[in-house]
Amino acid sequence: MMRQRCTPHAAASLLWLAAACASPDGDWESGTSRVSATGFTHGVAAGPVPWNQVDFDSPQNGGDRLTFALFADLTGGERPGVFDVAVEQLNLLRPELIVNVGDLIEGDSDNPAVLAAQWDAFDERAGRARAPLFYVGGNHDLTGEALRGVWAERYGPTYYWFRYDDVLFLVLDTEDNTPERMAEIEAERTAAVRIYSEEGPEAFASTPYATMPERTAGTIGAAQSAYFVDAIAANVDVRWTFVLTHKPAWQRDGEQNFAAIEAALAERPYTVFNGHVQAYGYEERHGRDYIQLATTGGLQFPELGRSADHLTLVTVDDDGVDVATLLLGGILDRTGAIPARGDTLCFESMKCGR
């Protein structure tokens, strides 16, 4: 098994089961921040913040190692019980912090009260995790004025950066469209969701929404791109950078704003995680690992690749980065059982007679 080292152009293959890869005050607009006693730094202004707490477990782990976890999409028809199992397993794994790749609620309404109830349900379950959880928005979370309004009220900015010790995290918003374009996308998405529920996925695939470039690769706006370029320049002393994004913006023809972020990162080691497709994927790009997570309770698409519920555990130390992708069906507690009655659930549709 290979390990990705802390060199600017290091890359390694990633296997499925254990792959070796690789204070809420501050001025969000200018990218400045305040450092807490635990080594947690961020670029979010006073007000709502996109994380649930900052009580880190064993902060900095002696100063030379960070272990954090990721989970994947929950949406498209969340399968009951799966995310509850994942939270209990996260508590067994004891990461110092938890991140994700968006699509945390269904977001299938423009009624703020309905959306607030969906977020309340997610927050309650996520709050059972011991480690701090940082929110990343997906299209189910951020498409349209109503969804973005609820997010802003509850969690503040849709894109931001934070730093834990000497590891930098960039959280992107791939629904960063102009208000006019967002209204067009929202209208087509609403119609497409209705067609999906009434006629199925084949009919959905022929809708205007399904063929929009924003549907698959998303949008990074110019202001967002500049914000991250500035954040990267302000954090030159980090040993690793992780980019968390819902949609794979680099797959859009002629895309320039995500490319500017990549260019700013060109001389440092970094890893990119995305979601959205709900099937596992890996590519090497610019000599770095770009890892597409599958699901942690969302609808699965085995026809698109390995579509299974999993967590991802990342360890960063002075030697580099290790990435382990852990199937939920294989994380057992001390009794030899899957926590939260997970033995009664199916975590990979291809193996459950879908």
Image (cartoon, rainbow, N blue to C red):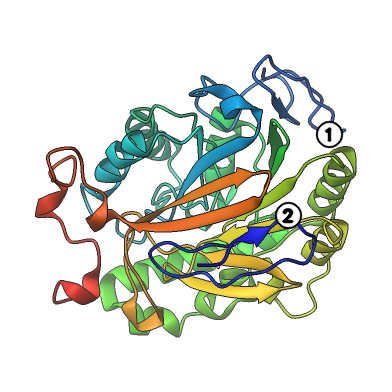
Left-right relation of 82 to 279: left
Residue 316 as seen in the image, left or right of residue 168: left
Whether residue 225 sits left or right of residue 184 in the image: it is: right
- Is 343 situated left or right of 40 in this image? left
> Which residue is nearer to you in this view: 114 or 32?
32
Circle 1 Cα neighbour tier, 10 Å, few/some/many (<14 / 14–19 / ≥20): some
Q: Nearer the viewer, residue 277 or 198?
A: 277
Is residue 322 among what the camera can see? yes
Q: x, y (%) of residue 72?
A: 43, 55
- Which residue: 50% across, 77% down? 210
Of circles 1 and 2, which is in front? 2
Labelled disc at residue 304: none
Secondary element at tag 1: loop
- N-term mark: 1 or 2: 2
Residue drawn at the location 29% of the way across and 77% of the way down: 200
Q: Is residue 304 above or below residue 16?
A: below
- The residue indicated by pointer 1 is 31
Q: Which residue is mark 2?
A: 6
Label 2 environment density (alpha carbons within 10 Å; few <14, some 14–19, many ≥20): many
Task: Give the quarter of the figure containing the C terminus.
Answer: bottom left
Quarter assignment of residue 340: top left
Helix, strand or loop for disc 2: loop
From the top left corner, tell me how far across and down residue 157 is, in percent.
67, 36
- 7, 130: nearer the viewer: 7
